Image (tube, rainbow, N blue to C red):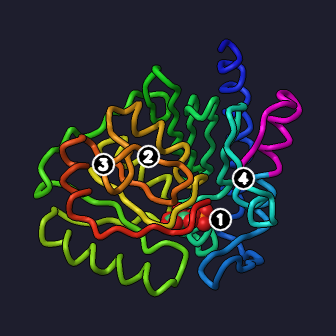
Amino acid sequence: MAEYNECYELVIGLVKEAGVLIKDRIFTQKDVEQKSCDIDLVTLTDQEVEKLLIDGISSKFPDHRFIGEEATASGTKVELTDSPTWIIDPVDGTMNFVHGFPHSSISIALYDKKIAQIGIVYNPVLEQLFTARKGLGAFLNGNPIHVSNQKELGKALLMVEWGTSRDPEKMKVFMENMTILNPLIHGTRTLGSAALNMCMVASGGADINFEFGIHAWDIAAGNIIVREAGGVCIDPSGGPLDLMSRRVLCASTSELAEKVANLLIQLHPERD
Ligand code: IPD
């Protein structure tokens, strides 16, 4: 669709504009509100960034639909149809943003007929712009990126997160999986932004990322960026990724993804 070029140009401009809000405010005091629990946070900046993106896209493409983290938190239903749909996390890594830990990103993706066409993850503080378009590769600040091609578990670096819930079952499964994986891998890292974790796999800095309990907006852009960088993005039990399942496993190679999928204790959170 020739329209994807226009969509891409438009959204790059909007993301850069919105990034200024994050960059200008990350080291200032914020008013913070809680959503589902005391570690699931929202700030005015999350809401303003989401509005800026939705207003900007709607003015040019009035028929396009949206799944936005903050609109959903205010009660808007999550529904992915065949229509062109933008899936938005305005500040992925809100906890980082609140603390001034410089790993927060805007994550936005365009899905058409439920297939990812555009993915953008932008950390304006560190000036990291990860982009991908279906069939056209993945890039960091305009330079092509590629996964590490690592196949061996013993040499793999894993990106993980505790997530933004204190659900006891979820924490138990997380601990069990760490106990299983830690002795087998090179190391673990945590950036505090699911989208940036995925981009680390896409750009070869890490080799595996999995999480139970993430939402569609956390992984929608990372999904296409990892795939276009040559990696795999699947369900943690080994099947195809289901964007609404709140489960993700991505890896540099299918061999590595399969090894991890076979080891993981599984969790099936309530769907988006
Ligand atoms: C969260 C971050 C975090 C991940 C959580 C997400 P938010 O997104 O990506 O790293 O562990 O699952 O919900 O709330 O900062 O947009």
The numbered dot on residue 238 is none
- As shown in the figure, which amino acid type bears the numbered disc 3? Gly
Q: Position of residue 188 (x, y in %)?
A: 27, 66
Left/right placement of residue 35 relative to residue 60 reads left
Closest to the observer, 265 or 149: 265
Q: Amino acid at mark 4?
A: Gly
Q: Amino acid at mark 1?
A: Ile
Question: In the picture, which quadrant includes the N terminus?
Answer: top right
Verify CB contact (< 8 Å) between mark 3 and mark 4: no
Q: Which residue is mark 3?
A: 205
Q: Is residue 62 magenta?
A: yes
Residue stretch rendered in magenta on the structure: 51-67
For marks 2 and 4, the one nearer the N-term is 4
Q: Is residue 176 left or right of residue 248?
A: left
Q: Residues within 10 Å of mark 2 (few under 14, many from 20)?
A: some
Residue highlighted by disc 4: 68
Specify the amino acid type for callout 2: Leu
Callout in the foreground (1, 2) = 2
Above or below residue 30? Residue 150 is above
Label 3, secondary structure: give it: loop
Q: Mark 2 near ligand 1 (CB under 8 Å)?
A: no
Does any atom of ligand 1 lie closer than 8 Å to the CB of label 4?
A: no
Labels 1 & 4 near each other (Cβ < 8 A): no
